[in-house]
Every structure is written in structure tokens, then in C-alpha cells.
Amino acid sequence: MPANPGVYRMLDAKGEALYVGKARSLKRRVTSYTQIGRLPERLRRMVSETVTMEIVTTHTEAEALLLEANLIKRLKPRFNIVLRDDKSYPWLMMTEDHPYPQIAKHRGAHGRKGSYWGPFASAWAVNQTVTAMQRVFLLRSCADTVFSTRTRPCLLFQIKRCSAPCVGRISTEEYARLVGQAKAFLAGRSGTVQQELAAEMEHAAKALEFERAAAVRDRIRGLTFVQGNDVVNPASLTDADVIAAWQTAGQTCVQVFFVRGGRNNGNRAFFPLHAKAEELPAVLSAFIAQFYDDKPPPPLLLLNQELPEQDLIAEALSLKGSRKVEITVPQRGEKHAVILHAETNAREALERRLAESAGQAKLLEGVAQLFSLPATPERIEVYDNSHIMGTNPYGVMIVAAPEGFLKAAYRKFSIRGPITPGDDFAMMREVLQRRFTRALREQMEGAPPTDWPDLLLIDGGIGQLSAARVVLADLGVQDVKLVAIAKGPDRDAGREWLHTDGMAPFQLPPRDPVLYFLQRLRDEAHRFAITTHRASRSKTIRQSELDEIEGIGAARKRALLNHFGSARGVKMAGLTDLEAAPGISRETARRVYAHFHPGVRMESVS
């Protein structure tokens, strides 16, 4: 084991990561794990399950810290502090490849030429900013395709949120001036913009252009409203993230406020997954390293806790952001007030989560009592099917646990068949066979599955229950409780019938909390099934026979459809017509023609 800085991975018998760590000296750190008597029980268990280790050396400890955060987010080892954050963050984009730049919300890679500001905590936050930018700077938000087809101003022009460049109501030069003001505002120079607008209003008034002066006055009012200063929009901060953590009952909430250009871009609460004994500074340190793994850090981080390796984390973030990043814990003044505000939000969010968990635990106790389960269920799986006249059939599984819905555990099952179209019983049998065959195979390979359900809830009646019972009996699964929930007369909510082995079918009182809970589980499965089916159907609708032709990608498909109008037009075209289509080579034309005319010898086609 080298004495270099680097990252080590502890792997179990299946080759899955148990723990990912970084070290200034790999040899010294890994040697510490051999001193079993000095390790806490949790780490003893981790070492006992470790079969092999992998290491990656780095030049510096800061590089090791960045690599460690990347691997933890990707592998999610169960002995690490893991940030569960798989959502992309929206950005504000101003295009730069059009004479009249568009301002819009953007997600994903910054592939289009333009300027980007963010991230924002939510779509709502960025939409609010887009609305403010329209109101103050009259920039267009419509797509280029809509812009090019307009013949008269849209409603946004009528309500004074756009300058209507699409129909020539503003010159290119004047629109460019608005764009410049908007960029200055987003860069934090709102005072300069306000001075320019004030001067413009006075000039218009002196020239007796009162309508123009009134329009500029409305823009100034909008700007004043947007840049109001308070604890949520601190004047002393330009670009910074305010991060406060709060810990109670072995759980942690981290609240992040995004401040860009002196404005609050919204906030979001995170609940990292960690052992109950982890101290708050260690959780916050791991959170920050993983949080900035896929996003650029701002030049300033305000925290409510000192970090164990604060200088190292600042160095790593500076390395990642290619600029100096400062981490500080303010003790007084406006920045301290901002931190206290974020800390209060973290505490209240965690209290709400704990209250919801307590309510969820009480409902799970009610479920256990209702169906005579040996203990409170830790995992409930709910199954449902969706199709239209047997087309695009899908089965789905959703999962509920004491902490709520586990969306990362949701599964989709594209029905393979062969089954009779619309046979819900056969669909249910296939879904359960595939789900439990895989679980049993994992169990036979030496690692008992961690996702074994305590209760299976099926949307349906006695028929679906019987189909599920047969599948589980064939597989030898005996320790899972089966329950079917059937809609009542006229499909009225509150009159559902519950079917399970060992009990006659029964109904719960209409206002029973456990009934509401079971309905919510059933409805979530139904929602997920419908969403999955619609996505599959939309994909099928977008496909055509051209997708089956080898060598025909999106660009050539678009060229053929634009030239011939439809896939049918391509199919009916002669070889000469295909060769004459823009962007289609002679070889491609012959390939397309041969696909639609398989019995024709190409040598005989002129």
C-alpha cells in the first residue's frame, strides 16, 4: 500500500462498495483498520464484510477529496454519509446565437451558445426570475420557432412584459441595450441599471415623451421590487451559498440558500443518509464535498458549523471551480443573520420530517395490526398494471417505507408475454415472477436481498390475489403477506374491499386513517403506472418505420420526412426521387429503397 494521497474502496464478496474513503497517506489510513480493538462496532462490521480493496492514488489530498465525493455519489456505499440528490438544477439562460436573445429556463448541459446564471433551487424560483426580467427588461421568452412565425404581437406585449422584437416593434440596437442592462442586473450591478433607467425617464419627460417616461417608470418600479433587501436578499452578498445544518434524533437536515447577483435564487432542504452516531460537522463536511461534485461552487460559502477539514475542502472546491473559494462561519452582522435564518429553516424542516415520520410509523403500526403482521412493516411493495386495449402493457412496483415513498426503488416492467392482450392476471403473474425470481437468485448467490418486502399490496380483487398467490407458491416464497385492494361499487373511494388469506373480504370505515393510507399507496402505484404507460405510448407514436432502417439516424430521418412529408411518402418514393432528396446520398437512397422493396433487385432499378 503506497504512502501517497488517494482514495480507497472497501468491497464485499459481490464486489459492491461498502465504504469509500480518502487519505493523505493510504498506507497509514488503511493500516488503522487492522487495529480492530480500537474501532467502533459499526466499523468492525464493515471490516468483517470487506473481502478486497481497490485504491486510486492522486497527486494531492484535495484531488483525493474530489474523487472520494464523486465515487460516494455514484456508488452510494452503505457505510458512508450519502447525499441523496439526483435532481438537476435549473439555470437561467440568455441565448447569444440570435439577433434578439431569448431569456428562458434551462436544464442539463450548457450546450447552446449563451450566458447562464444559477443554479436555482427550483423551477418556481427560476420562473419568478424570468417573469421579473420580462417585466423590467422586456426581453422575449418565446422559442426561436415561435419568434420566426409571429405576424403580430402576443399577449406579453399587451401586458408590457415583452418589447415585441418578433414584429419589429424595437430595433436591434435598442434591444441589445436592454440585453446589456439585463446582464448587468444579473451580475449584481442593479444600482447602475437603476441610475440608467432614472436618467432615461428624466430625458423622456423633458422631451415631453410622457408615455415613454411612464413605461420607464414602470420598469423602475419593477426593478425596485425585485431588488428589495432583507434577510432573504442580503445586500452584503453577491455570489454565495448559505448552508446551515441541524441535527436531531440521529437525523440531519441541511438547508441551502443560493444567492447569485445579490438575489436569493431559492432554497432547498436535504436529508443526507448517515449512521445515527455521526456528528454534525462530519455530516456537513461530507455533504459539501458531494453537493458540489456536479455543479460549480460560488466564491463564498457561509456555514453555521466549523468543518473538520475546512481548509482542505476550500482548497478542493477552489481546484474544482478554477477560482478561490472561501468558507467562513460568520459570527456577527448581516451574514450571521442570514446563517441564523437558514439554520431556523433547517430546524423547522427536520421537525416537520420527524413529525411526518412519526405519523407514518403510527399508520404502519395500524397496517400491521389490521393484517396480523408479526412486526411493523419496513417495506411495502405495491403493484399495478397499465395498458390500452393490450397495447404498450407495463407493470410497475412502487415502494413505501417508514420514511415515506422510496422513489429510487420504483421499478417498471415492460410486459414481454406472450399473453392475451388485456389479460391483467397474466400481466401480474409475469411482473411478480420477474421481481421475485431475481430476488431469490441474489439470495442464492450468497447475499440476502436487502429489499425483501413485508407486505405486497395489489390493485385488484380476488382474481389478482389468486394470481399472485400462485406465483409466490411456485417460487417457494412464504414469508410475504399478500393483500389485494379492490375498488368499491361505482369505483367510489372509501368503499374499497380488502382481500387477504385467512380473512373474509372486508371494508374499513370510510374515514379510517389506515384506509386513507392504503388508498394513497394504491393511487401512487396507479399514477406511476399511468405515467410509465404514457411515456411508452408517446415514444411509440414518435417512432416510424424509418427508425428500422440501418444507417438512418435522426438527421437523415428528418431530411426524408421534410422532403416527402411522411413515412408513407418515403415508402412510395422511387429510387430516383430518394436520391434527389436533400442530404441523402446515393448509397443511403438505395438502402431506404431496398428496405421498402425487399424483393426487388437493385441492379434492375434505374
Image (cartoon, rainbow, N blue to C red):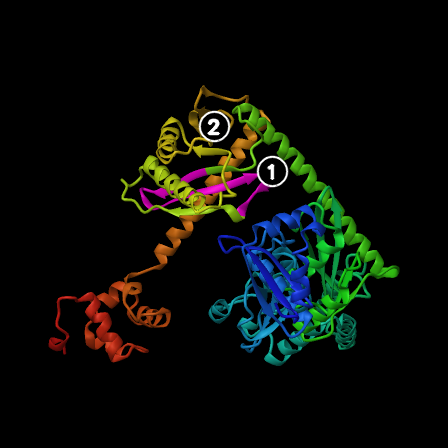
Residue 247 visible: yes
Residues in magenta, as a range: 383-407
Q: CA distance from mark 2 to mark 1?
A: 28 Å
Q: Residue at x 65, y 66 (%)?
A: 26
**Nearer to me, 78 or 467:** 78
* Element under disc 2: loop
Q: Residue furthest top?
A: 504
Q: Amino acid at mark 2?
A: Asp
Is 289 rendered above or below residue 182? above
Is 527 rendered above or below residue 536? above
Answer left or right for 502 relative to 237.
left
**Nearer to me, 461 or 138:** 461
Q: Residue furthest left?
A: 604
Q: Label 2, on which residue?
A: 492
**Nearer to me, 476 or 383:** 476
Answer left or right for 429 relative to 398.
left
Q: Amino acid at mark 1?
A: Pro
**Nearer to me, 47 or 236:** 47
Query: Which comes before the other along the chain, label 2 or label 1?
Result: 1
Q: Is residue 38 within the magenta segment? A: no
Q: Label 1, on which residue?
A: 402
In x, y percent, where is residue 516?
Answer: 56, 30
Magenta stretch prevailing secondary structure = strand
In x, y percent, where is residue 300?
Answer: 76, 67
